[in-house]
Image: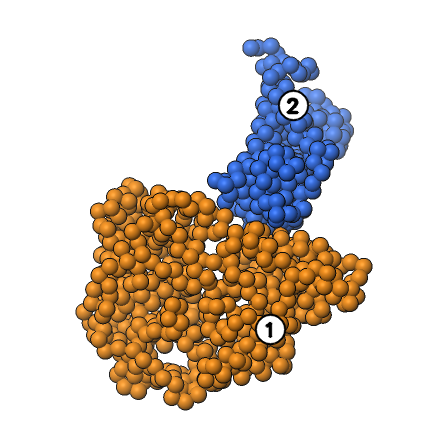
Amino acid sequence: MKFDFLNLKFIIGAFLLGFVLFLALFGNLITPFTANKQSLMDSLLPPLSGGHILGTDHLGRDILARMISGARVSLAIAASVVVISGVVGVIVGALSGYLRGTWDLVTQKIVESFWAFPPILLAIAILAFFGQSLTNVILALTIQRWIPYSRMSRAQAMVLRSLAYVESSRVMGGGLAWVMRRHILPNLMASAIIVGTFSMATAILAEASLSFLGLGVPPQIATWGGMLAEGRSYITRAWWLAVMPGVGIFITVLSLNLLGDWLRDQYDPKKTLNLI
Amino acid sequence: MTKTRQGLIGGAFGALAVLGLTQPLAAQDDKLLMVTSTFPMTSPTPYAESNAQMYSVWCQTYGCLGRYNYAAKEYQGILVENWEVVDPTTWRFKLREDLVRHDGGPGPTTADVLHSYDRVLNDPASIQKNIFSEVETIRAVDDYTFEIVTKKPLASLLSYIFDRFIITSAELAEANENPDEDAAFGWGPYKLASYMLDQEIALEKNDDFPGISADAPDTAVFRQIREAEQRVTALMNGEVQIARLIPPQLVSRLEGNDAISLAQSPSIEPMFLAFNPKFEPWTDKRVRQAAAHSINKDLIIDRFLMGLADKMDGPLGEQQICYTGPLDFVIDYNPEKARALLAEAGYENGGPKVEFMTASGRYISDRQVSEIVTQMMTEVGFEVDLQVPEYANLTAAMRAGELPMYYLGRGLFLDPSEPLSQYLETDVTQRIGYSSPELDALLQQERQTLDFDERCKIVRQAAELIAEEVPMFFMWSHRLVHGVSKGIEWDASADGEIWLSDVKM
């Protein structure tokens, strides 16, 4: 398979995501301030004043340092959610589509039950019950996000199980683990990666929404959603409080969506068969 | 009032709101006042809610015994004309005889008082039983005189019941299956015109109420808008004429707007830090004092709260009953002393670790203030784990005595007697878990002292003891700031409530 790396979606998406990743990994080299260090005497300084590149918030904390912390939190949570929900969803869906029967019936009922809840409401309920922590946010976001992987994997596994080479493998004595490892799971990877890219973007938005509602991580951890919520009240006096985290969320989600789009195009069978 | 009428008026308001015609209506009728509220009306039953805003609405419609006048610093009657203390446990009240019910029926009598007392205690919807927690019984003396007998001498009785005991008609309750819905007539200066649960309540002026001003609004609508930003926007757009409780960070949006003025008042809701001595390290008074010494209240008020708070050195501020001036024992900002106290308590090498709980959005800038407090305590050596649980979980845990340290307000705190007992008297509640025989004795003594000056001396002694022992560290009371459209005269009071008869249009 040949990837088109000169595609504009890839170039812009990779550049923006690379920029966010750079900030998250090496941001400490850019600013001497830390995310939680307050200085009430320096509150609401505008960008490029007092040594603060992006200004300070209502508690005199450096916005850039908080943006960097927010990038780390957002990316760490989103990546964890995507990996955990991807692994769970693909395995459950693949088994469901390949085995069929009782396993399929039971898992599909579970899928339908989880799918019936509005996702943000379920997350709010979990966080209200278990309290605020990074782990609980990941749990709250993961609990429903494995379902798209599962549905996609099930549908593809149902097709794959009836293909000649899979049936041959089974007839020749290939066990469940063998068939899954050699024939089913590798064929699901491309689709799972595409779902994962879009899912990462929605996980970042969901985490920001929970933080905006005050239900995300504890207050000592800076997040973009939390910054946005705090900045809302100061929008007419200090626009940078809300605009900066908003831009952070926008850039990250846009970059992931562009990369997801690009990946989908690359794996499109019509492109491979040169039908268009 | 019939259900049909309520439905028609409610429907009309709904239609107007949908069509965005509320503003033209306000322009047509210059005596229509639109006011924001932050608590919803969830039931037509006046005993089904227990928040100051709804007590105020029911007090102005059905009627209550009276209210506290913050300007005059005295209680003033609404349905009662006078009252006296007969003996240490018996208070006698005389109802006014010049009132007419909104439907033209007779004025309030002791039968209505006894009926209302029964409803507070026995109506399945009632959540107001606590207002009579210290009352033994209420008995009629004659048609217009009744006596309230307390379980023990209780100097602060009026603060429990005066504007909380809503009087409804016994006659209408007998004649109607659903009196709160079908016959919502009382004796107050305003009549209930219509309502939409969880949205708004409309009141009409009762022109028959003695002394009601011609300048007071003819109609008033309390519209629920919980978000402060939305309240400010609604005021700037002319959708409401009074937007209540504007937080400091939004005041600048209204300053300089020629069509809007700001009404400001000190409040009677102290914000405090609680240190629960049932948990380590708060068992040690020196650690509690160290935490208090680490907090720079002046800096927080000046730089973060924009000067819109009044610093407190104890449980009482100027607007509260029995305030007798600054306390002698004051814990000032002194980080060096805080470090020394921690070292003396055995934490010279760092620590102690403390869990700190706060609310988010329930009080003005509560979470942000807690973040500042966290940093200030950290700077003197505490290791603070700040948590912001969901508010219902927070208050449930607080009431169960499960929080080691928290930042909250106590609600309206006019008379210190009940709140201090509630938080600090041994085993009255579990909210703080503090126990001091000396403080218990003072609180019991002040409750039983009916001589006002003598009582206030005892309250001061209790306040001094609290300031030194620091189970609660009183921070400040937020200034209440309201946005008011030009052309409306209204003096904000320390309880933040709007008494429509005080408004001039």
Residue at 55%, 65% (x, y): give it: B312
Q: Which quarter of the figure is the N terminus of chain B placed in?
A: bottom left
Q: Is residue B421 above or below residue B332?
A: below
Q: Is residue B181 left or right of residue B373?
A: left
Residue B251 visible (yes or no):
yes
Query: Which hue is chain B drawn in?
Result: orange
User: Percent from the top left, x then y, of residue B31?
Assistant: 24, 54
**Residue type beneath disc 2:** Phe
Rendered colour, chain A: blue
Image position of B165 (left or right of A216): left
Q: Chain of mark 1?
A: B
Q: Secondary structure at mark 2?
A: helix
Label 1 vs label 2: CA separation?
64 Å
Q: Residues within 10 Å of mark 2 (few under 14, many from 20)?
A: few
Residues at marks 1 and 2, common chain?
no
**Tag 1, which secondary structure?**
loop
Which residue is the site of mark 2?
A15
Quadrant (top left, top right, bottom left, bottom right) of the C terminus of chain B: bottom left
The residue where tag 1 is placed is: B328
**Number of marks in the image?**
2
- To which quarter of the image does residue A72 belong? top right
